[in-house]
Amino acid sequence: MNEQVVASASWLAGSLDDPGVRVIDVRDAWEFDGIGHVPGAVNVPFERFRSDGDDGAGMLPGADAWAALLGEAGIGNDDTLVAYDDTHGVFAARFLVTAALYGHEDVRLLDGDYSAWNRDHATTTETAAVEATTYEVREPAESPLVDYETVLGVVDGDDPDTVVVDTREAWEFEEGHLPGAVHVDWRDAVDEGTRGLKPREELLSLFAEAGVTPDRRILLYCNTARRISHTYLVLRHLGFDDVAFYEGSLTEWETRGGPVV
């Protein structure tokens, strides 16, 4: 496993004493406090890092709000961030991609989720003491973000080497999707038994069957950029270098009158 993108539970267990490794639990506060959490983890629930606007639910929270949130959680710019949830990693992935889009360099998804961790590793209900930091949002060295006009150009045939991937459920795809898009449900990358990612060869086969291969440019969308966050990290974990991230996704696409078939 490439621990630089997806961290195994065993790696995290051996890194909990490292002050440069910060563990982020994005579940609701009642789960963090009542059910338990990874020792030393801080709680940053999903609702705290999604946009407040009705027309952008789930979108980026804004640079100032993000900086304040991470500073409050005691996170430093150079920390290694390892995030988890109890929903196969989709909310944790959204946290990590948000961090990367705001310039954080070392972000890692815990393979599996809290339930997987809880099988073999210690948990606690004690909340770790946190010293606030002054977190600074930075420009990422390279951003995967693409805008509406770029996606429209791809759909119109301006870039035939790009494959557009819809990561929603099959029924959503069937009800309406971007012209020419292929379908790969984000959940198909997850092993329901282990709750972690499927083996590398299975993942490569899953994507290849839809025409998603490392030699092509991949453009991801869903509804509000949450589900593509997981697929984005999976593809980076597999070594895909050219993965574009349509933050606006269908929320913006439909608002601006983009074609749907």
Image: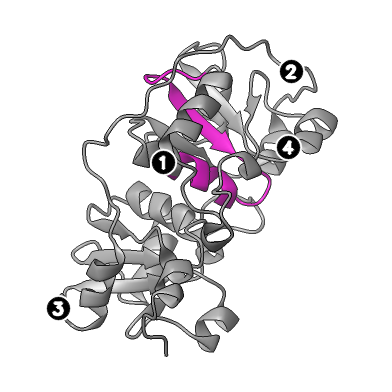
Disc 1 marks which residue? Answer: 1
The disc, 3 or 1, on the residue closer to the chain's N-terminal end is 1
Please name the residue shown 69% across and 14% down the image: 128
Marks 2 and 4, how far apart at CA: 21 Å
The amino acid type found where label 3 is placed reads Asp
Marks 1 and 2, how far apart at CA: 30 Å
Q: Which label sits in the foreground, 2 or 4? A: 2
Q: Quadrant of residue 80?
A: top left
The structure's colour scheme is one colour
The disc, 2 or 3, on the residue closer to the chain's N-terminal end is 2
What x and y, as percent, mark residue 4?
37, 34
Left or right of residue 121: residue 253: left
Please name the residue shown 39% across and 75% down the image: 256
The reply to whether discs 1 and 2 touch (Cβ–Cβ < 8 Å) is no
Disc 4 marks which residue? Answer: 119
Marks 2 and 3, how far apart at CA: 52 Å
Marks 4 and 1, how far apart at CA: 20 Å
In terms of secondary structure, where does tag 3 sit?
loop
Give the extent of the magenta segment.
75-97
- The quadrant of the picture occupied by the N terminus is top left
Q: Quadrant of residue 152?
A: bottom left
The amino acid type found where label 2 is placed reads Thr
Disc 3 marks which residue? Answer: 158
In terms of secondary structure, where does tag 2 sit?
loop
Please name the residue shown 66% across and 51% down the image: 87
